[in-house]
Amino acid sequence: MSQQHSAAPAPTPTTDAAVATVARRRDWWRDAVIYQVYPRSFADSNGDGMGDLEGIRARLPYLRDLGVDAVWLSPFYASPQADAGYDVADYRAVDPMFGTLLDADALIRDAHGLGLRIIVDLVPNHSSDQHEWFKRALAEGPGSPSRDRYHFRPGKGENGELPPNDWESIFGGPAWTRVTEPDGTPGEWYLHLFAPEQPDFNWEHPAVGDEFRSILRFWLDMGVDGFRIDVAHGMVKAEGLPDLGDHEQLKLLGNDVMPFFDQDGVHDIYRQWRLILDEYSGERIFVAEAWTPTVERTANYVRPDELHQAFNFQYLGTHWDAEELRAVIDRTLDAMRPVGAPATWVLCNHDVTRHATRFGNPPGLGTQIRLAGDRELGLRRARAATLLMLALPGSAYVYQGEELGLPDVVDLPDEVRQDPAYFRGAGQDGYRDGCRVPIPWTREGSSYGFGDGGSWLPQPEGWGELSVEAQTGTPGSTLELYRSALAVRREQADLGAGDAVEWLPAPEGVLAFRRGDFVCVANTTGEPVTVPAYGRVLITNGEVAETGGEAKVPADTTVWWTAG
């Protein structure tokens, strides 16, 4: 295991008093705005071109001033980086490219001192093939207890030359890789629903559950405020690992319950985890990355004795269309209400094309798009969509750089790409690198303020004009729109937590709803529309003209009003 375990002093467990510095109110997570930091692309403190924990720590005041409640950190654990850290070799160590455990401890404490909570990624479906458990499983050979912690199986065919079943990797190709046994002969196969460097754990083995309960306690004792669970719909596989019988399986994802995803057994795991979390003060939380066929199945993950939040991917995948948006909003609120969980809205993350680019393209292209589209249209719609999202009942997530209106970088040269799906030639489109380009902080510099030594992915020309420096204090900038919207959201008693909206009559292509004295109107059409003037305008991404009790709302514009 990592040297950090013995070389770094054991972090002092966070005290109840330290946790209390961010415990401003009960049930904070029901209306929290949580900012996702992708560590390698946020801020680089040592000039090696790769973001790190010290870089994040130095920028925490920016996040406080932005107005978010918590920060979710994508993986920074020890890893060979076959899938940007989602292949974990040691869950209790920080990868040297990001820093040390002491850096993580300092980051958590500084965040708490600024009134920010810290949520870390947890990757329980699979490990790295460089994890000690997996290396031992390879070395000990067939029939060893170590192999039982993963899914090793003999192959089919006369000489075991065929995979054990027909499952396909999410990244393309078979979900199985054959190993060479210690004696040099072709041997068993192991399951990996993602890259071959990411073998799936066998959650039927008690040691796996024991290990992850220990990992939870390690980071909770460090003071983290929660966990985002990667592939939360994975882990449990259908008994017998049955064939799917379909060779276009990837088209079924998100539409059907698969034998390797969204199995009912995952909920037993989360009930055990919730008991651990509830032992700790400060209202620590779980949020699920659960790609399920319906929002109703997503609601299963956030029942009162399981997780707290689950990303609303049905909402993320909805185009800028009033009828479609209203339908998914209603379905979401209706599904969450019976289990008493908040809706959790999201428009962007590290796996999908930024919404400023998605909304500049025609509908039907999915969430990974390699086309730039109409930049001006996409940004206008993205700003309007953000105001709509922040007006809805529940919690919301913001992905780093979306507050700058960053587009996806769609023209990265092939030779700089690092998404493992790109090199497998099938599965996911493999264009996730475009949303992972390091964000710009300043107008000038080798990496526009990201660091002193360039950036691990090349930034496009003109990136500096989208930087924090360029947008700060600039009226009408996307950054100032986010800052204003988040401030208003905090000030308005009718915004944030809740489980319902009151829909108001509106022209075709327009969403209008009331929450107490607050009214939101979103015009998703390409033309101005006239609606009632519902009171005092709080914020809008366009110019609204009011006369005679009516308001003219421009195309692709959202307006917040208050009657109070």
Image (cartoon, rainbow, N blue to C red):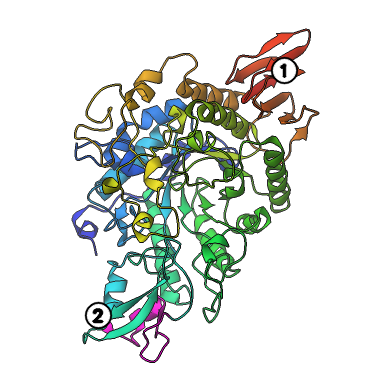
Q: Say what secondary structure mark 2 lies in.
A: helix
Check the picture and name the quadrant holding the N terminus: bottom left
Residue 418: percent from the left, percent from the top? Answer: 31, 50
Q: Is residue 448 magenta?
A: no
Q: Is residue 323 above or below residue 172?
A: above
Q: Is residue 137 left or right of residue 149?
A: left
Identify whether 64 is placed above or below 273: above
Residue 302 picture location, percent across and down: 61, 54
Label 1: few (<14), some (14–19) or many (≥20) C-alpha neighbours in 10 Å:
few
Residue that lies at the very extreme toward the bottom in this rendered image: 158
Q: Residue 339: horizontal and vertical position, in percent?
A: 69, 53
Q: Magenta span covers which residues?
A: 140-163
Q: Residue at x 24, y 59 (%)?
A: 5
Report the side of 123 relative to 524 (left or right).
left
Q: Nearer the viewer, residue 135 or 259?
A: 259
Question: N-terminal of the two: label 2 or label 1?
Answer: 2
The kind of residue on which mark 1 rests is Gly
Q: Amino acid at mark 2?
A: Ala
The residue that disc 1 covers is 564
User: What residue sits 37% from the left and 63% below the top?
Assistant: 195
Give how far across and how far down residue 169 sits, in percent.
44, 66
Cα–Cα span, label 2 and label 1: 69 Å
Q: Is residue 280 left or right of residue 162?
A: right
> Label 1's element?
loop
Where 57 sits versus 522, above or below?
below
List the single residue furthest toward the top. 548
Q: How many marks?
A: 2
Residue 139: numbered disc = 2
Q: Residue at x 61, y 40 (%)?
A: 319
The residue most toward the right is: 505
Where the C terminus falls, by quadrant? top right
- Disc 2 crowd rating (10 Å Cα; few below 14, some 14-19, many 20+) is some
